[in-house]
Image (tube, grey):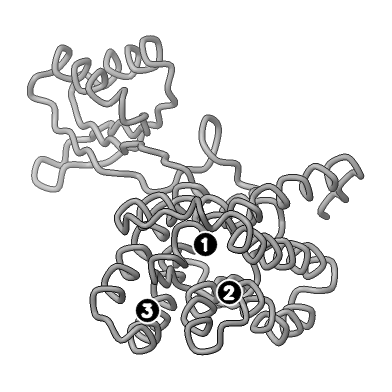
Amino acid sequence: MRKRKSIKRILLDYLIITAASVVYGLGTSLFSDPNNLAPGGFTGIAIALNRLAPIGTGTWFMLMNIPVLLLGVWKFGIRFIISTLYATGIISLSTNMIAQYWSQYAIHDVFLAITIGSALCAWSMGVIFKSGATTGGSDIIIKLLRLKFPHIKTGMLFFITDIFVVIFAGFVFGNINDALYSLLAVLITSFVLDIVLYGRDEAKLLYIISDRSDPITRRLLEELDIGVTHIFGEGAYSHKQKKVIMCVVKKRVTPLAESIVREEDPDAFMIITSASEIFGEGYKSYFEEKI
C-alpha cells in the first residue's frame, strides 16, 4: 500500500512544480517560439496555431489541454489531475507573461534556441513528472501509452508522437528548414528527458570465465567493492564444470575490473556489455514508480 505524502512533502512538490513550470514557459517563450521551433507535444502545436490565430501560445496551450485533462480525470483520478492542472496553468500563464514582458531577451540564434531551449523544456518536463504531475497535453497521452507499452521509455514515446507535431508545424510555417530544426529540437528533448527521468546508469555487465575465478572474485570484492555473483555452467565441448563470474560495474570502474582479470588470468574469457537499467543497491530502487 502506498504511503500518503505529508503536507510538507506536498508543499515541496508544488514548489518544485512551480519552478519547473516557469522554466518551461521561459524555454518556450524566449527560445522556441521566437524561432518558429515546434518542439513537439501540445507546446509545438500551440506555437504553430499561434501563427494561424495569434491569441497567445500559452492560451492555445491551455485551451487544447481542457479535453485531455478531462480524459486524465477519468483515467488517473482527480488528485493526479489537480497537480497537472496546476502545472498546466503555471506554464500557460508564464509563457504568455514572459512573451509579453521579456520579449526583448528572446534568443534569435536558432542553434542556441534548439539546444538550450530544448534542454530547458526537457529538464522541466522531467522534474514535473518526478514530482507527480505532468505538463498536460501529450504528457497525459504518453502516460496512458506507458500503461499499455511499459517497455518503451518515455522519451521514445514522446519522440514518436512528436514527429506528427513536427510535420504539422512544417505545413503551418511553410518552411522545410523550420520543420527540420523542430525535428532536431525533438531529438534533443527526447535525449535530455530520458537522462532526467532515468539518469545515466553508465554501467557495464561483465561475464568472466576463468580457471582462477576465486582470486578474481576476491579482488573484485575487496578492491572495487562491488557485488559479484557466481553462475555455474558446463563447457559444451569439454563437459568441464565452470564457475562464471557475473558483476555490474560503473563505467568508470570497468578498466580497473579488466586490469584485475588480465593480471590474474591473461587467458580468461570475458564478455562486457552495456546495462541500460539497473535496479538494486547502488543503483535505482525496485520500488520507484515507472514514469
Q: In the image, residue 258 lies at what x, y percent?
A: 20, 23
Which sits earlier in the primary sequence, circle 2 or circle 3?
A: 2
Residue tagged 1: 28
Whole-percent x, y for residue 203 in the image: 35, 36
2 vs 3, front mark: 2
Vertical position of residue 65 compared to residue 98: above or below: below
Q: Residue at x 92, y 44 (%)?
A: 7
Q: Residue at x 35, y 13 (%)?
A: 218
Q: Is residue 29 above or below residue 215?
A: below
Residue 81 lies in what quarter of the image?
Answer: bottom right
Q: Is residue 75 above or below residue 129?
A: below
* Three-letter residue code for mark 1: Thr
Residue type highlighted by circle 3: Val
Residue 110 in the image: x percent, y percent? 31, 59
Residue closest to the eye, 4 or 82: 82
Separation (CA) of disc 2 from disc 3: 16 Å
Please state the horizontal and vertical placement of residue 142, each as a whole percent of the image. Answer: 55, 73
Q: Are marks 1 and 3 in contact (CB under 8 Å)?
A: no
The label shown at residue 57 is 2
CA gap between label 1 and label 2 equals 9 Å
Q: Which residue is mark 3?
A: 166
Residue farthest to the right, as pictured: 7
Note whether 13 is above or below 62 in the view shown.
above
Is label 1 in contact with label 2 (beta carbons under 8 Å)?
yes
Q: Quick check: 270 left or right of 158?
A: left
* Sequence order check, earlier mark of 1 and 3: 1
Within 10 angstroms of label 1, few (less than 14), some, or many (20 or more) residues?
A: many
